[in-house]
Amino acid sequence: MYSTFGHHPHRLGYLCVKFNFFQGPIACELGVQISDEMLGKNAQTVVRDKATGRRRDLNAERAKQAETDAAKAATTAKYEAWNKG
């Protein structure tokens, strides 16, 4: 697999990357070391919304869900007190 978008890497002098399933990605012939950051190793997982494709903020969603659960629990407790009358 070449990263040169259809051009021959040796003629154009591009950095090409071959994928070897036993050794992982390696730079071909140039001897260039590709950093883990460029390869995306140890990167944080990105969770996206299916409809819009925007990134989701999971911590904000959990906080909002906890707030709505607390409000729902308060109203449920109030209605249970009314039913005991």
Image (tube, helix red, strand yellow):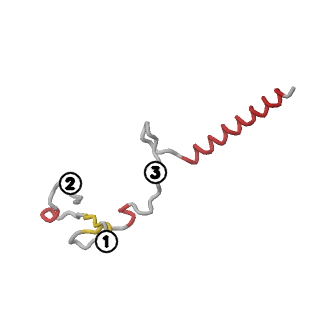
- Say which quarter of the image contains residue 34: bottom left
As measured in the structure, the alpha-carbon distance from the residue carrying label 1 to the one carrying label 3 is 26 Å
Q: Is 45 left or right of 19, judged from the image as shown? A: right
Residue 45 or residue 54, whichever sits in front:
45
Which residue position holds label 3? 46
Badge 3 element? loop
The reply to whether callout 2 and callout 1 are in contact (CB within 8 Å) is no
In this rendering, is residue 21 above or below 79?
below
- Say which quarter of the image contains residue 31: bottom left
Instruction: From the top left corner, tell me how far across and down residue 23 is, in percent.
Output: 32, 71
Residue name at image x 12 percent, y 63 percent = 11
Instruction: From the top left corner, tell me how far across and down residue 30 is, in percent.
Output: 22, 71
Residue name at image x 15 percent, y 57 percent = 7
Which residue position holds label 2? 5
Residue name at image x 41 percent, y 63 percent = 41
Local crowd at mark 1 within 10 Å, few (<14), some, or many (≥20)? few
Q: Is 49 left or right of 6, judged from the image as shown? A: right
In this rendering, is residue 21 above or below 53?
below
